[in-house]
Image: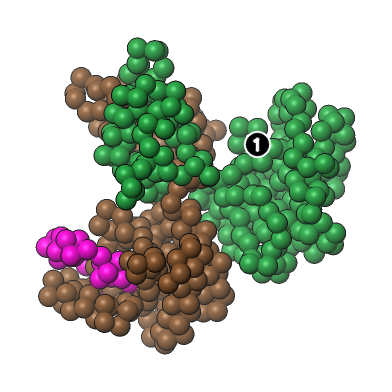
Chain colours: A green, B brown
Amino acid sequence: MANSSSGDSVTDRLLRVLETFTPTRTVQTATEIGRRAGLPSATAHRMVGELVDAGLLERDDDKRIRIGMRLWELATRSSHALRLRQAAMPHMERVQARIGEHTQLAILEQDEALFLERLSSPGSGSNVTRVAGRLPLHASSSGLVLLAFGSLSLQERVLASPLRPLAPETITDPAALRRKLAEVRRVGHAVAPGSIEAVSTGVAVPVRDETGGVIAALSAVLPRDAQVEIALFELYHAARETGRALGYRG
Amino acid sequence: MANSSSGDSVTDRLLRVLETFTPTRTVQTATEIGRRAGLPSATAHRMVGELVDAGLLERDDDKRIRIGMRLWELATRSSHALRLRQAAMPHMERVQARIGEHTQLAILEQDEALFLERLSSPGSGSNVTRVAGRLPLHASSSGLVLLAFGSLSLQERVLASPLRPLAPETITDPAALRRKLAEVRRVGHAVAPGSIEAVSTGVAVPVRDETGGVIAALSAVLPRDAQVEIALFELYHAARETGRALGYRG
């Protein structure tokens, strides 16, 4: 697309505008968007005006800008995220009904675990995961599954990067992470006590396609000292049924 | 944003590209995108290339183009759709568990009912609604609620437009629709037997904000001759609780 005088494409600028919106920053002024996106104010105002006209952004009652319902609709209605999520939903609901704890679906996206869905009961414990939110691969149980069954190049990239702690028990030592990944491959699932929050244990299993490739992780967040067996049994069942719903014979 | 020689802005062209993807057309070649968006092939290929580089579109294993997970993430993580949907979810799950039929959340968007969520059991009956899909306001029970409690200008606009039948019993006569809307306002909810499909009855109730304004509709799709009372009771309860979860005291 057309380039600006600074050489960045309109697509780059659009991406920068969209990236200024976060789960905790859902409305902004055009001036704030420009500042956060590193765009001249006039450019930001013109771009925001055009995106509002197209319905991709919206003005709320206070004239502040938010993500447009039309953008959500266009990004969702034909997305792979929706297909995977719709296939998994009935089985995730069953898991959630059986164990009464947070139940989640995640995929690998840009070296992180991206959460497509999260079901929670009012009585469920603490959980930092959000729909369309991300967690590091080395810290979350979903991430450990996606990493353990991911490509060797992904594993080497993550093992060579700083392994930031999210909690005192997050694995931050590359050698320990390597051992953990080998364990996940050997037992077929991940159990991660205290690696995101001291009070909880994440458990995750892989969702596989017809060739055995891992396309997603189904996980549950349990109270720290809960038994993991029933949750794992239900998650394995749900993962198998999700694969079937996607047309894989498994 | 920069204009092309034909005078349409890059935002317009971006919107046209995104609109070529639909629930039934989730992957396309760049050439097909260009043709469907009415763009010259070179322009389409360049735009698609840039959008793929930004992660807003993706190439699948067959080099065909689909909506990018990054676009879904950016459009979802800070969206009003997600906030509303997260507030409604636990209550929709309860409705669905109690009545065992499709349970849906819709908002008014560009004079149509846009569905933000749909929960279904394996045993639920027929249902044309899709997540991020739309139905006409005059035909769906959700639409009738959103229309009945919508602005007068919206009502006049819809009443003056062609009322397309989706099924033999869809209301297509403006005078009959006017009477139906008055009934919805009087009883507080919509019951629409056979208006989308002959085999089912839609029932919908409003979700209200603090001032009583209607911000969404919660609905269920029942077998045609099912009793509607229990579904309505559960939907009213869920709508009230959704309003509370959004911080409205109601």
Could one spot residue A60 in this view of the protein? Answer: yes
In the rendered image, residue A8 lying in the magenta stretch gets the answer no
| Up-down relation of residue A87 to residue B248 (above or below) | above
Q: Residue at x 81, y 33 (%)?
A: A172
Quarter that holds the N terminus of chain B: top left
Could one spot residue B16 in this view of the protein? Answer: no
Q: Position of residue A13 (x, y in %)?
A: 41, 25
Badge 1: few (under 14), some or many (20 or more) residues near its Cα, within 10 Å?
Answer: many
Task: Say left or right for B61 vs B219.
Answer: right
Range of residues picked out in magenta: B141-169
Task: Say left or right for B159 vs B51.
Answer: left
Q: Nearer the viewer, residue A183 or B81?
A: B81
Q: Nearer the viewer, residue B188 or B5?
A: B188
Q: Image quarter for residue B13?
A: top left
Under mark 1, the amino acid is Glu
In the rendered image, residue B150 lying in the magenta stretch gets the answer yes
Q: Position of residue A26 (x, y in %)?
A: 46, 44
Numbered circles on residues, count: 1
Q: Position of residue B20 (x, y in %)?
A: 33, 40
Q: Position of residue B38 (x, y in %)?
A: 25, 32
The residue identified by callout 1 is A112
Quarter that holds the C terminus of chain B: bottom left
Q: Nearer the viewer, residue A211 or B87?
A: B87
Q: Residue at x 48, y 33 (%)?
A: A19
Task: Say left or right for B114 vs A79.
Answer: left
Q: Chain of mark 1?
A: A
Q: Image quarter for residue B45?
A: top left
| Up-down relation of residue B241 to residue A91 (above or below) | below
